[in-house]
Image: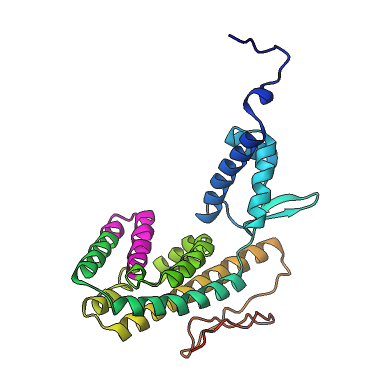
Amino acid sequence: MTKVPMELHIEEIIGGPADAQTLAATVGHRLRGLILNGQLRPGTTLRLSPLAASLGVSVMPVREALRRLEAEGLVVLTPRRGATVAELSLEDVEEIYALRVALESLCAGRAAERLTDDDVATLEKLFLAMEVAQKAADLAAFIDCDHAFHTYLYSVSGRSRLIRMISELQDRSRRYVPYLYKAWQLAEDPLQAHRPLLSAIQSRDVALVESLTREHMSQAADRLFRTIARETEARRTSGSQAARRWRVPQTTAKDPALPRVLDGDRAPAPVRSRG
């Protein structure tokens, strides 16, 4: 058996470039999950040494993981200051959810045209699973069941390109999901918001399925926008006595999906579908 020279460092035995990349990916996956589920809150400082110690790795894969998360927009790297969790963006909410409202309502309408009895039975079971999760006060399970309900409905449409675009937008908005349900719990029973949609699905009412999906997503965007605006205001106020007060805008009946700009700010023009 070949003996390993005593002077050989342990890093040379277990860690070539591929290993370093694997560690960085593992660390990045862990930190990404903590950011997306809200455990690492916006503005949190991410210090290399404490992170490395808590994850049981060296500083190098943590540094590489933070660079990758910066590219994803989840982390901000500042010279001499280090890394912080990126703040939530009202502009991102407006843009992403405007697109989701348009695409998901279209996809739901096309799905309603193709629903079979088996499809309706599956959606009824998923709705029941949401009900069970809510009664058990299991928010994580409710979120999973809610996602499964809408994902299955969209899959019935058979529109692969449309489904792929929706999936990409859902991935981009994952970070906002905990804030959405936080707002929802304060505002109304989230299960009740799905009941009219399930009823429209059961009756195969194409126009109603499409309009209720649009309404459902628009209301979600409005709640999310307001929650993030309040939290942003609270953080700014606590950080500076001179922070100005933000006015949380009212949405219009004509286009409830697109929140208006905050007082004194200008937001990008809302993305609107054509046709």
**Quadrant including the N terminus:** top right
**Residue 126, how many percent across, how many down?**
27, 62
Predominant secondary structure in magenta?
helix
Q: Is residue 90 left or right of residue 251?
A: right
Q: Is residue 233 magenta?
A: no
Is any atom of residue 33 visible in this view? yes
Give the tally of numbered discs: 0
149 magenta-colored: yes
Task: Give the side of residue 63 with respect to residue 32, left or right.
Answer: right
Image position of 208 (left or right of 37): left
In x, y percent, where is residue 91?
Answer: 61, 73
Measured as percent of width and height from the top left, residue 2 is found at 62, 10
In the foreground, 183 or 141: 141
209 relative to 58, above or below: below
Residue with the most extreme front position: 1
Residue 170 or residue 241, whichever sits in front? 170
As rendered, which of 250 and 75 lies closer to the eye?
75
Q: Residue 226 in the image: x percent, y percent? A: 53, 73
* Visible residue check, residue 44: no
The region drawn magenta spans 132-153
Q: How is the image coloured?
A: rainbow
Residue 189 figure quarter: bottom left
Residue at (67% x, 26% y) in the render: 11
* Quadrant of the image occupied by residue 109: bottom left
- Residue 124 sits in which quadrant? bottom left
Residue at the location (40% across, 66% down)?
185
